[in-house]
Amino acid sequence: MHCLICPKCCELEVNEDKVVGAGCRRGEGFARQELVMPKRVITTTIWCDTISDRLKIPVKTCEAIPLADIRLVMRDIRSIVIKSKPYVGQILNDIGRYSLEVRLLVAVQLASNLPFSFH
Ligand code: SF4
């Protein structure tokens, strides 16, 4: 398996109880987590409808989500529409009916004239 924590993407092997090939300690934890319950951070967008704009807001989950739950969480995220522009780094945790407890982090600074703004 490849470690997905940083762009170095080390190739990891698990031999009995040892993890081989990790360039740092985090790789060992990643390999062990992958064997027990693989998880991923979701990066996606949600809609923001204001009086004057319809924007797509880049967000990511604050925590890694078990692979088995990603479809369920994405279904809920797709239904989210917020009514005011969030700021970068804002945590959106009161926006809805998540099937799981998931918090979203606004990932990118918004500008009013970005191409993903619809009028
Ligand atoms: S093992 Fe460490 S250095 Fe290698 S990809 Fe993972 S985080 Fe990066």
Image (cartoon, rainbow, N blue to C red):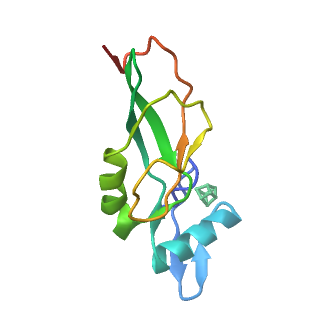
In the depicted view, which residue is nearer to us: 62 or 12?
A: 62
Q: Residue furthest top?
A: 113
Question: On the image, which quarter does residue 100 sit in?
Answer: bottom left
Q: Which residue ends up furthest to the front in the rendered image? A: 51
Classify residue 75 by image quadrant: bottom left
Instruction: Name which residue lies at 48% across and 14% down.
Output: 112
State which image quarter holds ligand 1.
bottom right
Image quarter hosting the C terminus: top left
Foreground pick, 50 / 64: 50
Check the image and report above or below for 45 versus 25.
Answer: above
Q: Residue at x 61, y 82 (%)?
A: 18
- Place of residue 2 in the rendered image (x, y in percent of width and height, measured from the top left): 48, 61
Q: Is residue 5 left or right of residue 77?
A: right
Residue 39 visible to an observer of this rendering: yes
Q: Is residue 32 left or right of residue 119?
A: right
Answer with left or right where residue 75 lies relative to residue 53: left
Q: Say whether residue 1 is visible.
A: no
Which of the pair 44/78 is nearer the observer? 78
- State the image coordinates of residue 12 (x, y, percent, origin top left): 52, 68
Q: Residue 114's x, y, as percent?
A: 43, 15
Residue at the extreme bottom of the image, as rendered: 16
Label count reads: 0
* Nearer-the-camera pick, 1 or 26: 26
Percent from the top left, x then y, of residue 74? 34, 53
Q: Residue at x 59, y 30 (%)?
A: 87
In this rendering, the answer to whether 65 lies above or below 54 is below
In the depicted structure, whether residue 81 falls above or below residue 66: above
Query: In the rendered view of the protein, which quadrant contains the N terminus?
Result: bottom left
